[in-house]
Each structure stands twice: as structure tokens, then as C-alpha cells.
Image (tube, coloured by chain):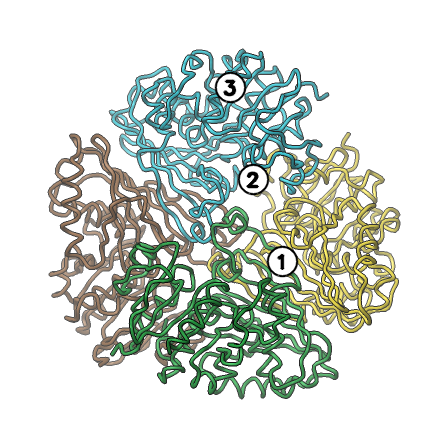
Chain colours: A cyan, B brown, C yellow, D green
Amino acid sequence: MKQSKIAIIGAGGLTGKELTSLLAHHPHFQLVHITSNQVDGKHIQEVFPELSHVPDLVFQKHDSPVPEDTHIVLATPNEVSLEKAPHYLNEGKKVIDLSGTFRLHDKTKFEKAYQFNHSKFDLMEKVEFGLPELFREKIKNANFVSNPGCYATSAILPIAILGNLRKNIQGPVIVDAKSGVSGAGGRTEEIKFAYTHVYENFRAYKILSHQHEPEIEEYAFVGSDPKEIHFTPHLLPVYRGILSTIYITFDKPIDSNQIQEKLQSVADKEPFLRLYKSPEDIELKKVQNTNFLDLGFKTKGNTLVLVSALDNLVKGAAGQALQNLNLMFGYPETLGLVNL
Amino acid sequence: MKQSKIAIIGAGGLTGKELTSLLAHHPHFQLVHITSNQVDGKHIQEVFPELSHVPDLVFQKHDSPVPEDTHIVLATPNEVSLEKAPHYLNEGKKVIDLSGTFRLHDKTKFEKAYQFNHSKFDLMEKVEFGLPELFREKIKNANFVSNPGCYATSAILPIAILGNLRKNIQGPVIVDAKSGVSGAGGRTEEIKFAYTHVYENFRAYKILSHQHEPEIEEYAFVGSDPKEIHFTPHLLPVYRGILSTIYITFDKPIDSNQIQEKLQSVADKEPFLRLYKSPEDIELKKVQNTNFLDLGFKTKGNTLVLVSALDNLVKGAAGQALQNLNLMFGYPETLGLVNL
Amino acid sequence: MKQSKIAIIGAGGLTGKELTSLLAHHPHFQLVHITSNQVDGKHIQEVFPELSHVPDLVFQKHDSPVPEDTHIVLATPNEVSLEKAPHYLNEGKKVIDLSGTFRLHDKTKFEKAYQFNHSKFDLMEKVEFGLPELFREKIKNANFVSNPGCYATSAILPIAILGNLRKNIQGPVIVDAKSGVSGAGGRTEEIKFAYTHVYENFRAYKILSHQHEPEIEEYAFVGSDPKEIHFTPHLLPVYRGILSTIYITFDKPIDSNQIQEKLQSVADKEPFLRLYKSPEDIELKKVQNTNFLDLGFKTKGNTLVLVSALDNLVKGAAGQALQNLNLMFGYPETLGLVNL
Amino acid sequence: MKQSKIAIIGAGGLTGKELTSLLAHHPHFQLVHITSNQVDGKHIQEVFPELSHVPDLVFQKHDSPVPEDTHIVLATPNEVSLEKAPHYLNEGKKVIDLSGTFRLHDKTKFEKAYQFNHSKFDLMEKVEFGLPELFREKIKNANFVSNPGCYATSAILPIAILGNLRKNIQGPVIVDAKSGVSGAGGRTEEIKFAYTHVYENFRAYKILSHQHEPEIEEYAFVGSDPKEIHFTPHLLPVYRGILSTIYITFDKPIDSNQIQEKLQSVADKEPFLRLYKSPEDIELKKVQNTNFLDLGFKTKGNTLVLVSALDNLVKGAAGQALQNLNLMFGYPETLGLVNL
């Protein structure tokens, strides 16, 4: 049954934990190696006592040797991914990277967004962007996949699937996104993620300067003319989930039926995209602990308002990574991702 | 000391409670009469056990006689305000109405937004809109004031104080607002405001169809060309506070200094407007239980992003009502509204 | 595969929803019939949009005919269970009742606790109490099982498994229990379960007068001398989970090792009982969405403090019901209850 | 007006912030000096932006000189209080210490509870325990007051005011206490106080080993026979407030009227003690941001259950400190503590 071996480098964080749990229930992937420079030497059960039925593994140092015939998930900080991805690719392993290191093809934009020098930019010719709804066939044949950002997924997918309707978009697209703390990028021991600072509170952060802004700009308009994205993330007093409200202005009044038909035609064939009749029925509760992206819209004059929601740790990270792994290894795309 | 007598009609709700508490600490207003058709006959202490040092009053029916020389705050549903406002005005009393009934001067827009026939529309010529930062002098001389909506206050004020910069605004202004449950308009016993439905959750509602949208459209552009507002409210798992993120596109690149100067010049003279250097420092915690509207901005190309925050029960309702009462009765505007 | 047919009478509540979800993933039970007098006529997906992969069923009225060869779970109010249980038993069906109607063998105590006259008390001779850790063999052979209360499970199990150590207990046993709203017995549209009344709040209720108090008294001391229970439930600002702190005074100083050995010997053979070295490591997070009861203890002088935690909707209701169904139908006890 | 000068040593924490806010509204105390070794050099407004109308002060190092004729509040860690208290007392200043350093008169118990050697134990003869309801007259004449712990206040007061009824108490008294994070003693940047670890969660900690246990034992039975206290604190997903459920067993059945009379006679003369007819009406919401201790009880057989609630930052810390300051300086005891 368990025929494909997986190692998670950087398994001690929230995404690593989520993926560990997903793999434990997958019929074909076997997690055989986990690393963390913070908790190396500890048993997985000790670090994640909430998980039941996880494999009998002990955290290793990042640099410890990976077992043979094992493929790699990098759930590491950007700088570590930069070093580790080429290393494992050279060893002939398949690699999925969950960091932001290999997402942007414009080096200037990358270095502005991530504030460090990208020394392996030649790899940008080899990597595929792991958004199955847009790049399914390429992912199937890829050895190296860069998993999208959680905010980015919530914005790219709704815009990109508008397809040729995008050519009439005028001016910047507004993405007003709201995330729970697990998607807001911070380590939980930071004071700004203390209960005291989060409960009964709400705030915007990195307004017009979040590193997912150029990622949305690159992929939301694939196959169409590029448009500017104005992206504002906010921190919700919630643990899991992202809801994005996207405002698109067209150069003429919108035909609501045309939008409906276009989105429905995509939703009909996508296993993890749910289209709602009323966007007011979308809520975080319905996507938490699922791999779905829920989508709805309203129109008024020239304006289209899209509402999307997803679980940042599942469709926004570990679930999407598993969806990509299924594609890369020739397993059914939804395996281990329904009935979570 | 206590020289001006006040009655609150509809004092049993959240706004009535907040105003009761504020008046109890005010040196000159004396609350002498409270009504509620739900809890009439009960002592105020019984209905609001959390309040200390409130006056020794028992709730009366709405129709019970108001003591002489007493002025009126209507914290009633729209239909009740429609009936009661002219009644008390005819008796020569000053009236502040906290409902939406007397805010819109366009009857068609009113009836579309509020879904009922407005039989007292002639009063729209006599009422002043109770946003002191915009209509201070008019309020001072008014007998009848319509207190603004909570969402509306959070959006009108930031836009309106842009003054003549508004003439270069192009296309619709996006107001993406997020409110705690006390500002989301619902009675708390509704199932959608149950803990179960609110905690760890987030959703949009009344997208492009909220009754505050035409209110923002009417007042945000006073003295300038009208623009369309696209307004989306969202429900936060929070009790108190509204944070609005406002996206304005101009017909040319914006000069950040010009915005700063304009907003600062207003903030310098407004007692309840705080301008932040960084809009990321604005958060609900800083405005809860205060009468402040906190404001900040960022620019990028042609786009201006404004972030505003206020307490929907104070600056968005009872606090603003007291600010208006101070003006109408000739007391210092900030009396009873600082050091809450 | 799906070989045993199940109907849930009263499937529209929280427990019905939880059990529907559990049965959907069980290899042998097929849910074929669901009733609700509130939402009859609606499709299950409409009522529980958060559930994926549920059977294609429409809610029927309670009185609608149950398909042949179908066994019954009653998730109904006490009065409905009182009427329905004998009805279905007479038809030869196996019945599990999740209400409190058939738990107490002392009619006086029952009628005091539940405040209604029990007209089918003869059934108390036929029913088994569905706590598998205590009555496993009886449940296997039962046609009629009364599922324990959620609070009761959290208190009975830790005390009962002390076995013969209970004979040295002196004086009343204190059970100080804290539950999330889903276990606090109320319908969520009640004002006391509104977000406004629950968030940032905490309170005790039904002090020394909760209906689970006599239930704990009856079953915690099975096979030993009866002792008085003093039970105080509290409402946590949490959705799911019960943590009970139990204070037991013995007639002499306690040997901590003896307690440890006794509890460990039970935990070693019980699939859903986890014994912790440190009771401070027990927390709601670790039991939410699992069928585990987590247990730990400390001693000081003559006093034993037990801490237990469980998910009130799983081990405290639907999960325990499925555990009982597995036993009654001869399936492995843990089927469908691990890796939730 | 402002006639008595106060310095807060260690003003950068939650208690320092609360006391700063209280003093700002007090007619006679003037805060003239604040210290913090973490944020020295910063202006008070920068550290506490939520506070309005605070004095124009900059944080100094702990060792910086205190202005003349200024009295001292120590809101410092135990070791700092140990060093600073005698220092300021020698200078002839009045001192209130909010740490646990000077609360226990049994050196062995102190060193076991606090895990450090107490080098100034001679001061224990000079210090008064700052619980005004028990030691009002002594506090009035004291130069050195040790402010009680927050948990301790919630337990000592309800037990102590039973007066001579305490002589019939048998066996250990159980104090099962539940606190929000601000009362649970931790610095908020600790991982265990991260939103992620607190929301939707609940746990016990320091079972039978909390440092407030000996404090309750010493003061709850003043003037009566000592009894053992068994104290278990728990962490609520709440910011402010402690609710304690106290179980007392008597050597005979209790007369509920006798308890009522005793408690009522105390409540009648105590400004900050509110006695409830039903203990189920007590809740954190009613005491948050007030200096009240709310109290209620139920009886059954030999057992008395007391429920008490207070705000750990007000009656449990800064409010009680101000109540003591009022007494020490001859001001009305409730000055600056009502209508918060």
C-alpha cells in the first residue's frame, strides 16, 4: 500500500504538522523522515501530542541524511529552501517547496518582496507553480513544484478562472484579505500573536507591501494582460482560515450571467472549488479543515465583487501540497483530501 | 449641576445602555425617563446589572408621558422613530434620532434601502446630519438631529475630510468594513449571533446592498462631485468595534505629502480624530470604549488606502449622540466623552 | 460493506449532526433515515452544509415510518424518547437513547431531576447503561442502551475505575466541571448562548442541582458503597469540550503509586482512555474531535485530585453512541472512531 | 488637588498599566515617577497607546532616583521587591508591594512556594496584609503594605468573612479557581499564552502547588482554627477575571439562613462586596473593570458552595492597591474606584 516515501524538511511548524497528519491517512505516501533544528531528537508524538496514529518517527537535524528513494517536502524558511531545493533536486529527488523562494520569475520583484539575494535563480526555469487548477498538466510532469502562498491561492484562483473575461478588467484589482493567526505568517511566540493582542481585536498589516502581492500579480493574469494588484491583509481573532474580498472594475457593465457561467464551468470540473449562489453563505467555518476553496460573487454596474474562503493550512498549504504530490506521483488528485 | 433633562425612548438595547452609562457620568445631562416595550416595568439596574451608579429609573412603555422640559433621544427601530420624531418635535422638544429613518434625502434611495414607505419626508428639510466634524455649526442650532450610522461614520469621515482632493477621485470608492457583533445590526438572540456561529468564524453580508451604502454616498462627497460607493460589511468574532479599509483611485498618481497635510490639518483641530503615522498601528483595541475615530493611510500609484477604526457603540452611536447633545445644548463638545 | 441500517430520530441537533458525520465514515453502518420536526422536508446537505460526503437523505417527521431492518438512535428530547423507545423496541429494533430518560433507576430521583412523570419505568429493567468501559459485556448483548450524559461520562469513568480503592473514600466527592456551549445543554438561539453573553465570560450554573448529579451518583460507585456527589457545572467561552476537576477525600493518606497502578491497569486495556503522567498536560485541545477521555491525577495528604477531559459531542455523545453500536452489532469497538 | 505623589516601580506590566490608569482619574494622587528596565526611555503614551490622559512621564530605570516626598508602589518581580522594599522604607516612604514577597509569615512555606531564600524576613513583623475588608484599621496606620494575590483575594475574602462559622469546618477546603490570562501570572510573550494555545482551550495548572495556596491558608482562617486549602487554578480563554468555586464541608448540616445572615451583615458595610441571591447570576462580565468582589452561595447537607468573582487586575491587584493607598493616606476608601 504505502509505496512512495516522503521526507518533510522543517516538519516542526504548523504546516509540517498539518501535512504529517494528512500523510498519516493517505494510502500510498509513507512519511519516513522528519527534520527540525528546533526540536531534533524529540519523538513526533511528543511534539504534536494532539495527533493520533502518526508514524513512529524522531525529528532529525535538517542536515541529517534522507533515506533512499525518498522525495522531499520543504516546509522551511526561505533561506533554507534556497539551499536545500537544488541539493535534493541534484540527488534526483522530487521536491515540493512551501516557502516563497521559488514563486516569482521577476528577480527584482523577488528581492524587493523577500529582502534577500536569490542565488539560485536559474531554478526558476525548472520549477512549476503548484496551483493544480491552473497548472495541472505541468505539475504531473514536474520534479520541482513551488507551492503557492495561502493568501495568494485565495486571490489568484478566483481571478484567474475568469479566463478571457479578464481582458476587460480596468485599473487595479483590490484584494482585501482577512486571515486567522496561523495564516498570518508569524511565529506564535511573537508578542503580537499573544492571546492578549489578538482576542477582541482586528488590524491591517503590510498594507500594499505584503510579499504575496507580486505573487498574485504574476499568476492571477496568466494568459491575459497583467494588471496591478492592491493587496491588504488583516489579522482576525481566529486560528484558521482566510476570507478574501476581491473588487474588480471592468471597462463596461458586467453581465452577471456571463460571470456565473464562466465560474460554474470551472467549478463543475474542479474537485476542490465550490461555487455558491450567494457569497453571503460563504464563511470560514465551512472551509476549516477542508481542502476546498469556496467562491461566490456579486455585481453592480462595472464592478464585480468576489468572495473566496479557504483553510490556510490545508488548501493554502499542506492540503495543496498533497494535491500536488498526488499529481506528481500519478495518484488520484483527491486521494487523502476528502472527508478530512 | 444636572440642568438638562433627557429621555431615551428605546433604552433597552445596546445603544440605550451605552448612552445611559455615558449620561450617568455627564455633569449636566440628567437622564429622567427611559422606555422599552420589551422590559417596561423593570428597574434599570435589573436590566443592566453591569452598570453601576445609574439613575434610579424604571422602564416605561414607549407611549408613557415624558416629563416636562425633557429632550429626546430616539434609540428606536425605524418605524417607531418615524412616528415619534414628529410627535416630540411638535411638542417643542429637541430630538436626536439614532435610527436610519431621517438620514437620506433621496426618497427613492431611502425606500429601496429601508424597504418601507417614508410618510414624514417633509422632516428631511429640518433635520441635520449629526456628524460634528462636518456639520458642527448646523448641529449647534438644530432642534432635530439624525445621528449617523456606525459603518457610515467610519467611511464618511475619512473620505469627506479629503476636501478638495476628492475632485480627482475616479471611479467607485471601495469600502471594505469589518464589524463586531454589536455593530452588525442584529438582535443578539438571533441564531446567527450565537456563540456557535460567530466564534472562529468570519463572513461577508449584505454585499453591495447594505442600507449604509447610500448614506455614505450622500455625505462622503458633500461639497464635491458625487461618486459611487461599493460597500461590503463583514462580521468579526468580536463584540465591539469597526475597522474599515477604504480604497480610492485617483485620476493621477497621488502625492502622499498632500494627503498627509490635508488629514493632519483636520486632525489638529478635531478632538475625536487621531491620525496615525502608520495605518498598521491602528487596531480595534485602541478605539474600544472611546469616542475616537482613528485614521491612517498608505498610497501606491493612483491608489489611496485609508484605514479607519472606531467603537460602533460610542463614536458610531451613543458617544456621537452625546457629542451632538453637547453641541445642541451649548456645552463643551468633549464633555463626558474623554477618559471613558 | 454497509450492512447495518441506522435511523437517527431527532437528527437535526448537534449530536445528530456529529453522529451523521461519524456514520458517513463507518464501513458497516448505513444511515438510511433521519427525522426532525423542525427541519423536515430539507435535505441533509442544506441543514449541515459543513458536512461533506453525507448520504443523500431528506429529513422526515418523527412519526414517519422507519425503513425495514433499521435500528434506532434516539437523539430526541426526554419526552420524545419516553414515547419512542418502547415503540421501536416493540418492533424488535435495537435502540440507543441519547436523552436522560432511561439513565436513573431511582424513580424519585429521576422525577426530581427531570421534572416530569416517568410512565415507562418498567423499561429500566431492560436498559443497559452505555458506558463500555464499565458495562462492555452487557452492552454487547443489549437491545436497548441508554447513552450516558456528557458531564456524567467525564466524572463517572475516572471515579469508577478506581475500583476497590473507592471503599476508602470519605465524605462527598466534589465534581467541578467546565463545559463549552455545545455541552451546556442549551439550544444555541437562547440569549444566554449569544456571542455577546459567552465571549470573555464565565459562570457557574445549576450548582448542586444539575440532572447529571444523580447519574454520577448511581454509576460512579457501581460495585462499591454509594457516596454523595456535589456537582457544579460551569460555562466556558469555548464550543467543544468538558474538563472536570474531581476532588476525592480518603479516610487516610493516599499512596500515589497505588492510584497510578490502578488507573494504568485500566488505561492499558481501554482504547479510549489516555492516562497522563502530569494532569497539567491535559487540555481541551487534545480531546476535541476525538473519542478519548484523557485522565490524570495529583495527590496531597488524604486528597486525590483527578482531572478528566473529553469532547462532549464525541465521547460525551455521538462517539460513545457509535462505540456502543459497534458493540451491539459485533463490530470492532473502535471502528470509525480513531483518526477522526 | 493632586497632593500625594506616587511612584510605580515596575510600571511596564499589566498591573502597572492598570494602576497608571486608575491614578490618572484619582483626585488626590499624582503619579510622578515610573520605572521599567525593559522600556526605560520610552514615553508612557508610547508604551500604553490605549491609555488616554495619562501624565506626561518617561519610564526610568528601576535604580533612578525617586522624586522627594513620593511614596512607592512596587509592581516588581519578587526578587526586585525583596531588594527595593527595605530600601524605600528606610528612606521613610510608604510602600505597597504587589509581589508575593511579603505575604507569608512562615519562612519554610515561603521558600517552598517561591523557591528562593528570603533575606529580609524581619520585615514580616512590620508589614500589613492589604485586604481592607479584614485589616482596614491596620492598613490605615501602616507604612508598609503587602497587596494580596489575585487568586488569594478571591478565596480568602469569602472564607474569612464566615467568621465564627468557620469553627465547624471539617477537612480541607477546596478552591477550584479559573482565571483569564492576565491573572494567570505569565508574561504574554510565553508560547503558552499565544492565541493559538489559549483560544478554544482550557486546562488546569500548578494543581495543589500554586504559590497562592499557602497565602489562602494563612489569611482565610485568621482568628479561627487553621484548615488545609486544596487549590487548583485553571486557565480560561479570557483576558480578565477570576471566578472561584469554593467547597466547604462542615461537621453538621448547614443552616442556609445563618450563612445568608453572616454574609449579608458583611456585605452591608463593605463598599466593594456584592452578595447575590443566586450564585448563578455571578459572572465575569459583571466584575470586569470594577473593584467589586461578587459573592454567592448554595448549600446541600453539610456542604457549602461559595462562588466568588473579581477582576484580577482591579480588585485582584491595582484597584485593591489604590483602595489601600486611600486608607494609608486618609482619603475616602472608594475614591477613584467607583464608576470606572
Camera-near label (3 vs 2) is 3
Please say whether residue B48 is visible from this viewpoint: no
Q: Disc 3 marks which amino acid? A: Ala
Image position of A59 (left or right of A97): right
- SS category of the residue bearing label 2: loop
Q: Is residue B172 above or below residue A132?
A: below
Q: Are marks 3 and 2 on the same chain?
A: no
Q: Disc 1 marks which amino acid? A: Ala
Task: State the image coordinates of residue C70 (x, y, percent, origin top left).
Answer: 78, 41
Task: State the image coordinates of residue D292 (x, y, percent, origin top left).
Answer: 46, 74
| Chain under callout 2 | C
| Chain under callout 3 | A
Q: Disc 2 marks which amino acid? A: Glu
Q: Residue under circle 1?
A: D204
Mark on residue C50? 2
Give yes or no for contact between labels 3 and 1 (Cβ–Cβ under 8 Å): no
Give the Cα distance between marks 3 and 2.
38 Å
Q: Residue under circle 3?
A: A85
Q: Quadrant location of the C terminus of chain A?
A: top right
Q: Is residue C240 above or below residue A251?
A: below
Q: Are marks 3 and 1 on the same chain?
A: no
Q: Dividing the picture into quarters, in which one does residue C105 lie?
A: bottom right
Tally of marks: 3
Q: Residue at x 76, y 72 (%)?
A: C172
Task: State the image coordinates of residue C205 (x, y, percent, origin top left).
Answer: 60, 67
